Amino acid sequence: MKGRMRICAQGHYSMHDVCPVCGQDTHTPHPARFSIQDIYGAYRRKARK
């Protein structure tokens, strides 16, 4: 288990990989770190369109 808060699809916060309330998988609500040398930025912008 990592030291970051995680959130499930229903909005419950937890520190676990699986939500103890609803049993769904959780993901991190924090954005990715910013980097000037973002080599995949063009691909993400293209996928968003």
Image (cartoon, helix red, strand yellow):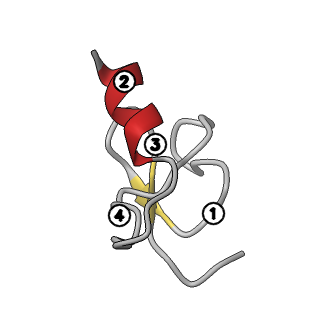
Q: What is the quadrant of residue 45 in the picture?
A: top left
Residue position for label 1: 16
Measure the C-alpha gap from mark 2 to mark 3: 27 Å
Looking at this rendering, what residue extends furthest in the top direction? 49
Mark closest to the chain's N terminus, 4 or 1: 1
Kindly identify the amino acid type of the residue bearing the numbered disc 3: Cys
Residue position for label 3: 8
Residue drawn 36% across the image and 56% down it: 29
Image marks 2 and 3: residues in contact by CB distance under 8 Å: no
Task: Note whether 16 is above or below 35 in the view shown.
Answer: above
Tell me: 25 left or right of 42. right
Instruction: Please identify, in this view, whether the residue under mark 4 or under mark 3 is nearer the observer.
Output: 4
Kindly identify the amino acid type of the residue bearing the numbered disc 4: His
Residue position for label 2: 46
Image marks 2 and 4: residues in contact by CB distance under 8 Å: no
Instruction: Please identify, in this view, whether the residue under mark 2 or under mark 3 is nearer the observer.
Output: 2
Q: Tell me the crowding category of disc 2: few under 14, some 14 to 19, or many 20 or more residues within 10 angstroms, Cα based.
A: few
Mark closest to the chain's N terminus, 2 or 3: 3
Tell me: 3 left or right of 34. right
Pick whichever, 34 or 4, lies toward us: 34
Image marks 4 and 3: residues in contact by CB distance under 8 Å: no
Measure the C-alpha gap from mark 3 to mark 1: 10 Å
Q: Tell me the crowding category of disc 3: few under 14, some 14 to 19, or many 20 or more residues within 10 angstroms, Cα based.
A: many
Instruction: Please identify, in this view, whether the residue under mark 1 or under mark 2 is nearer the observer.
Output: 2
Looking at this rendering, what residue extends furthest in the right direction? 1
Secondary element under disc 2, as helix, strand or loop, is helix
